[in-house]
Amino acid sequence: MLRLTTRLAPTRPILRSLRQFSGFSFAGPKDLNQILDKDAIKGLDGDQIASIWKEFHAEKKGTLGWVVEGSVGKLVLHRANTKNGKFFISPVFKEEGGAEGGEVDDAGYYNLIVQFFEPSHFVLANLQDYQADPANAKPVISFSVFDDYIESKNMTLVRADIIVDTFREGEAEKIIGGILKRFDGRTCSKDWVDIFNNKPEDFNFDEFIEDSRTVWFETENQGEAGKKE
């Protein structure tokens, strides 16, 4: 079994195993009309639609509703669809009071694997579970980046479904915010998604973890989300 530590750079074996993997099933809404009646809100401006989106998800347990700039969503989807960004990893760092949702190692984090489904869907699972039994690894979060209003309203609606609710308060938001930041890529120190998928020999795992740690503890999440606890 592969073991992820800050002393190893396991990108190539992870990619080999993932490329042999048939993939997770995406269970969340795949079309915005499954969530929002677009015909009923045709006359509303972007701020009104964003308010409805966030209020709806704030009252819906187990979901998050984000609004990010249209340019962010456009770039995330473009890069995910065209840069061979099918897989990625997302570290979850231990904070005060411990961590749930995965087995934290001595370095203070555990990893989720991220799989992208065309045209706009992401699924996350515990990497340790996947390594132990790929066929039975269960998704813990899925989210979609809807491009319906990218051009007309300059905004992107993001919907996340928390499938296994073992995350600490605010943790899912940090995870998704970090993934959006990586797939956007403009404010990252390196194009980690491209390197991970296309140049694994250049992927410095130690550097990536330290960069991710900084993002986790020191930066604000992209967008705003609503969640009912």
Image (cartoon, rainbow, N blue to C red):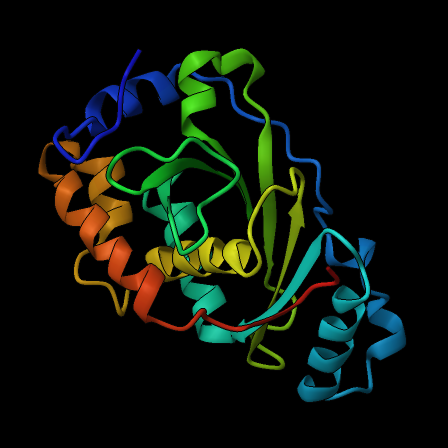
Residue at image x 44%, y 74%? 71
Name the residue at 33% across, 41% down.
Answer: 109
Front residue (pair 63, 80): 63
- Identify whether 193 is placed above or below 68: above
Residue located farthest toward the right when viewing the structure as drawn: 40
Image x and y of residue 116, in percent: 48, 40
Q: Is residue 146 above or below residue 42?
A: above
> For the N terminus, which image quadrant?
top left
Q: Which of the pair 163/154 is nearer the observer?
A: 163
In the image: residue 98, left or right of residue 229: left
Q: Quadrant of residue 19?
A: top left
Image quarter of residue 205: top left
Residue 194 against residue 52 in the figure, above or below: above
| Relative horizontal placement of residue 146, taking residue 53 as reference (left or right) | left
Q: Position of residue 37 (x, y in %)?
A: 86, 66
Q: Tell me: 193 left or right of 121.
A: left
Total numbered labels:
0
What residue is rendered at 33% in x and 64% in y? 217
Query: Which residue is painted at 80% across and 59% down in the image?
Result: 60
Does residue 94 appear to the left or right of 40 in the view shown?
left
In percent of width and height, residue 65 lies at 67, 64
The quarter of the image holding the C terminus is bottom right
